[in-house]
Image (cartoon, rainbow, N blue to C red):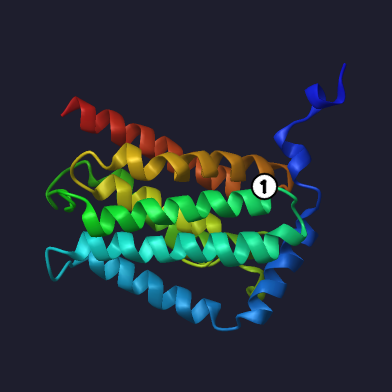
Amino acid sequence: MPDWLQFSIFDMTPYDRQGWFRLIESYQQDFPYIPLFSLLYAALLAFLILRPPFPQAPRFALGLLAISWFWCGWVFQMQYHASLNWAAPQFGWVFLAQAGLLALAAIFGKGITWRDSNDRNHWPGLLILLLALLYSLTGLLEGRAVNQLEWLGLMPTPTTLATIGVGMLLAGRWLLVLLLIPVLWALVSAAFTLKLDLFEPYVIAVALIALVVGIFTLKAD
């Protein structure tokens, strides 16, 4: 059988879990205020979603996510992850594309509003957002040091989860446009981390199940 037919996505993870932890540790050593920025980021995002003080709050939330996707693509993927994974620069461009989509939606999108707060279909989006907020804590269960945790807004997986959660809370037809790349990345990332024996694939599985349930519930209405 030709070698290329034996290639799988797992071949794109040429490192073990300790190598991944050391990469994140190096990243946080260069940016020591990541946990603080992440907590402020999470608080602002939650404020824009739960108590939006003005009609433009959804656009600000999308803009906040656009900044995160840009940072994760340009800084983390292209400058740090690339030292371990030959495909990381290509991942970086995908992240930049998603940042562009979010920015365009935030600035030019029509009908960007939150769905009615009384909508019983809010729970899938809120559940996914809760997973994004708590994601960094799963690293403690894996035996990571604090400076090896993955923080919302500054690391790909929690940012991806937050984007899916926010997308589920938007009214209108933005779901497919804004969530295609995050869902695809979630699947790719889950495949990588399954090989590394991390909790991430299980967190992503719960999030994607909630997403599917939410979509079918919306269609039923």
- Comparing 50 with 192, the one in front is 192
Left or right, residue 76 beside residue 11: left
Residue 62 versus residue 4 in the image, above or below: below
Residue ranking furthest to the top: 1
Residue identifier under label 1: 193
* Residue at position x 60%, y 40% in the image: 188
Q: Position of residue 118 (x, y in %)?
A: 12, 49
Give the crowd class for mark 1: few <14, some 14-19, many >=20 residues within 10 Å: some
Using the rendered view, name the quadrant where residue 146 is placed: bottom right
Q: Position of residue 161 (x, y in %)?
A: 44, 52
Q: Position of residue 170 (x, y in %)?
A: 23, 48
Whether residue 183 is visible to the viewer of this picture, yes or no, is yes
Residue 19 against residue 221 in the figure, above or below: below
Amino acid of disc 1: Thr
Left or right: where does residue 164 sit relative to residue 61? right
Residue 129, picture quadrant? bottom left
Quadrant position of the N terminus in the picture: top right
Residue at image position (58%, 55%) is: 92
95 and 47: which is toward the camera = 95
Quadrant occupied by the C terminus: top left
Residue 62 % position (x, y): 31, 59
**Residue found 25% across the figure and 70% down from its top:** 47
Label 1: which secondary element:
helix
